[in-house]
Image (spheres, rainbow, N blue to C red):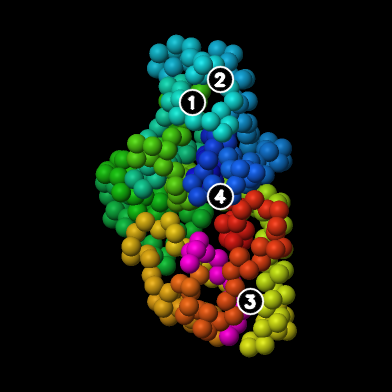
C-alpha cells in the first residue's frame, strides 16, 4: 500500500520516484543462504517498464540518485544550503544497514509529517498560489459550517458514496470525514514550500507511515486526475511475470485437483473451486483473531458444501482449519509447491494472494 501511495504521489507532484535500496523486508526473510532475501520494489513490480510507457512517471534507483545528484554536490542541507555528501560518500546501499542513509536524506530533503490517519493530503489543481488557497478556503467552509452542511461524519457516507465527478467541496467532505486530526490538521496541503523543495523524503518513523490505500489519503482538487490515478494503478501496477506465472500454474493445478472431487458437480465438470483468505500470523489485535469454528460459521453461506476449497493463509498450523476440512475438500499452497519448485519462497505470500 505504501508503495502504491508513493508512486501516485510522485506522479501527482511531477517528481522522480527514487526507490529505496534493497533491504530485508518484514516477513520476507525465508529460506537458506542460496535464496535472495534483500529486496527492492523492482523485485515485485514492473516499475522500469511503467516508467518507459508513461512519460509522466519517472523512477530511478537510490544509487542512481546518489551518483547523479548527491555526489555532484547538488544536494544541500535543508534550511542551511550547506552542501552535504552521502555518509562516507557511499552510493551503493543494497543489502547493508541503511539508517545513516535515511538520516542523510532527512537532512537534505523536506520531510513532511504526513499521517494518513490524521489528515488527507490535498493536491491542488495547479502550481498557482490561487489553487492552494482554493483548497484552504474550501476546507475552512466545510469545517466552520459556512458551506451550508454540518461537519461530515463517516456514517453520512455509509452506503452513500460521493460521485467521482462531484464538486470539490463534496468530495473533500467525504475524504476528511474519518480523519482524526484536530481542526485544520485534517487537511495536509501540497503547498508552495513543498512544491519548491528539491527533495521530499517520505519517512516511516516518528508516528508517520504511509501504510494506507492511496485513494483514502490523497485528495485531488481535479476529479479527473483522481480518476486517472486510480485507473493507472488498476491497469498497470501488477506483480512481475515470475510471480504472476507461478500463480497461474498453481491455479491450473488446483483446477485439475478439483476435477477429481466427486462430491461437488461443478468441481468435477469444470474444475471451479472456492477460495478463502484467512490472515492470521501478523494480526496484532486480538478481536481479529477469530477461532476456526467462528470463521466457518461466518463463511459457510458463501461457500459450497463438499466443494474444493483453496485457503490462502499465513497460518502454519493447518490443523487449525479442522472445521473446514470436515466440510470441504480443503487444499493449501503447500499442496501444490511441486508446480513452482524454483520460485523464491519469499514470493509465496504474493502467489497465495493471486
Q: Residue at x 47, y 80 (%)?
A: 323
Q: Residues within 10 Å of mark 1 (few under 14, many from 20)?
A: some
Q: Which mark is residue 101?
A: 1
Q: Which mark is residue 337?
A: none
Q: Which residue is mark 4?
A: 30
On the image, the x and y values in percent for residue 124 come to: 47, 37
Query: Which badge, 4 or 1, comes first in the chain's sequence?
Result: 4
The local secondary structure at tag 4 comes to loop
Q: Residue at x 55, y 12 (%)?
A: 73
The local secondary structure at tag 2 comes to loop
Magenta residues, start to end: 306-317
Q: Which residue is mark 2?
A: 90
Q: Is residue 257 magenta?
A: no
Query: Which badge, 1 or 2, comes first in the chain's sequence?
Result: 2
CA distance for labels 4 and 3 = 29 Å
Does 145 sit above or below residue 106?
Answer: below
Circles 1, 2 touching at the beta carbon (< 8 Å): yes
Q: Which mark is residue 273?
A: 3
Circles 4, 3 touching at the beta carbon (< 8 Å): no
Amino acid at each position: 500500500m505504501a508503495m502504491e501511495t508513493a508512486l501516485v504521489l510522485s506522479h501527482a507532484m511531477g517528481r522522480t520516484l527514487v526507490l529505496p535500496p534493497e533491504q530485508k523486508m518484514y516477513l520476507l526473510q525465508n529460506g537458506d543462504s542460496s535464496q535472495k532475501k534483500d529486496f527492492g520494489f523492482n523485485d515485485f513490480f514492473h516499475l522500469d517498464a511503467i516508467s518507459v510507457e508513461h512519460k509522466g512517471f519517472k523512477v530511478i534507483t537510490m544509487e542512481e540518485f546518489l551518483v547523479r545528484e548527491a555526489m555532484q554536490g547538488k544536494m544541500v542541507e535543508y534550511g542551511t544550503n550547506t552542501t552535504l555528501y552521502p555518509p562516507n560518500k557511499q552510493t551503493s546501499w543494497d543489502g547493508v544497514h541503511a539508517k545513516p542513509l535515511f538520516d542523510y536524506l532527512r537532512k537534505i530533503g523536506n520531510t513532511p509529517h504526513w499521517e494518513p490517519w490524521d489528515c488527507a493530503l490535498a493536491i491542488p489543481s495547479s502550481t498557482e498560489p490561487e489553487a492552494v488557497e482554493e483548497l484552504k478556503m474550501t476546507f475552512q467552509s466545510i469545517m466552520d459550517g459556512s458551506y451550508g452542511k454540518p461537519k461530515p461524519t463517516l456514517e453520512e457516507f455509509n452506503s452513500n458514496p460521493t460521485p467521482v465527478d462531484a464538486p470539490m467541496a463534496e468530495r473533500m467532505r467525504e475524504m476528511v470525514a474519518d480523519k482524526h486530526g484536530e481542526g485544520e490538521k485534517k487537511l495536509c496541503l501540497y503547498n508552495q514550500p513543498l512544491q519548491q523543495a528539491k527533495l521530499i523524503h517520505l519517512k516511516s518513523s516518528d508516528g508517520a507511515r504511509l501504510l494506507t490505500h492511496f485513494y483514502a489519503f490523497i485528495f485531488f482538487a481535479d476529479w479527473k486526475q483522481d480518476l486517472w490515478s486510480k485507473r493507472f494503478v488498476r491497469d498497470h501496477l501488477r506483480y512481475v511475470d515470475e510471480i504472476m506465472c507461478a500463480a497461474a500454474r498453481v491455479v491450473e493445478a488446483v483446477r485439475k485437483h478439483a476435477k477429481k472431487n466427486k462430491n461437488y458437480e461443478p468441481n468435477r465438470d469444470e474444475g471451479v473451486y472456492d477460495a478463502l483468505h484467512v490472515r492470521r500470523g501478523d494480526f496484532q489485535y486480538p478481536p481479529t483473531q477469530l477461532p476456526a469454528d467462528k470463521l466457518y460459521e461466518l463463511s459457510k453461506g458463501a461457500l459450497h458444501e463438499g466443494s474444493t476449497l483453496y485457503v490462502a493463509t499465513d497460518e502454519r498450523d493447518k490443523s487449525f482449519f479442522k472445521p473446514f476440512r470436515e466440510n470441504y475438500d480443503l487444499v493449501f499452497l503447500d499442496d501444490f509447491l511441486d508446480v513452482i519448485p524454483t520460485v523464491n519462497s519469499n514470493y509465496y505470500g504474493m502467489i497465495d494472494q493471486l
